[in-house]
Image (cartoon, rainbow, N blue to C red):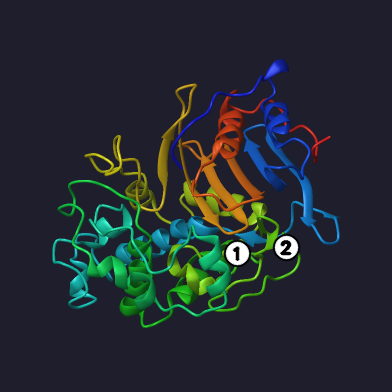
Amino acid sequence: MSGAARPADAAGGDAFAAVRRVVGQRPDDEATAVVVRLTGPDGRWQCASGVADLATGAAVRDDQRFRIGGVTKTFVAATVLSLAAEGRLGLDDPVRDHLPDLLPRAVTVRRLLDHTSGLADESDVRYNDTEWFLAHRFDTFTPADLTARSLRRPLLFEPGTAQQITRANYVIAGMLVERVTGHPYADEVEARILRPLGLTATSLPGIDPTMPEPHVRGYDHGVDVTEHSPSIHGAAGEMISTVADLDRFLAALFAGEVLSRPWLAEMLRVPPGPYARGGPAFCGAGLDRAELPNGLTVWGMAGIVHGCLSGIVATPDGRSRFVYLVAPTSRGGLRVPPLVQLLVTNAFALFPPSSPGGAGCE
């Protein structure tokens, strides 16, 4: 969740109006649908614009499910940290103490979660290649499949000296949860987060390619890519949710309902040092830090899968929150493309939101 964009005109002092203008009228060349939920101290506003299904023309609704991609990592990080809080593992434990011979001893649990492991961001799964994806989207992938190429490569840097987002870090974090608990990591996420918070529209589908109803369909250059095996993402991105469930999770997380304050602080701890592809490090454990054009620091996570861009963003106190879904017309390779940058920037441009506004886009 890095990057920023200039805010749109926020005439009238209304952040809701500013976001509404960016949402616009969909579908268009950029997106088939956009759904947003903006919550501030003075109220909440939701907006859905576009179509959920190009074949039927059915309008998108703000209660529909979608694939959340990398936002899955926030749930997985919280699950690992809850195990640490229970003393079942230590953040400074070498991962190989729990998963023997998998990684060099310098790669600790903490370094998986904050992406300072040094693992290369390489995989035999070609996430950005639509032609490859269409040919393999119903294949079943194991954690070993998702991490093999990364594990074969030399480390990019000495663990702890730099940062680079790598899907393998969180696939391995899922493996770690399973080794420590004896249960599938999905079961632990459900038991520790989904059920206690009542997130009934959120799920970890495993290898099931279908989407529960109601849902938003996703496309890539006109091809319906909604159905595919979630195992292609694994613990780095398999989950399904709604804007309401994600907002509830975000509110609970920052309120200390998921983790106690010392462990929540670990999610907000950005290590010193550079980001390997330029600039300073910005990733905590399952949350990224970004500074907006108005100087406000926010925390969140972005997800990208074929057919869906999604994300969660909050102020440090959790009182102002923004959740979004964009169903883009093409996959692209940016976690936070310009449209998303504009949505996030305008959501917080007049922090805090001034009024709850209406229930929809009009």
Task: Name the amino acid type tagged 2.
Answer: His
Q: Which numbered tag is attached to residue 240?
A: 1
Q: Which residue is most to the front?
A: 131
- According to the picture, the residue beneath numbered tag 2 turns out to be 215
Label 1 residue SS: strand
- Looking at the image, residue 95 lies above or below residue 322: below
Circle 1 crowding by C-alpha within 10 Å: few under 14, some 14–19, many from 20: many
- Looking at the image, residue 359 lies above or below residue 175: above
Q: What residue lies at 17% left-to-right and 77% top-to-bottom?
A: 101
Residue 18 seen from this side: yes
Task: Name the amino acid type tagged 1.
Answer: Ile
Whole-percent x, y for residue 224 in the image: 69, 64
Q: What residue lies at 55% left-to-right and 61% top-to-bottom?
A: 130
Q: What residue lies at 13% left-to-right and 66% top-to-bottom?
A: 105
Whole-percent x, y for residue 354 in the image: 67, 25
Circle 2 crowding by C-alpha within 10 Å: few under 14, some 14–19, many from 20: many
Whole-percent x, y for residue 108 in the image: 21, 61
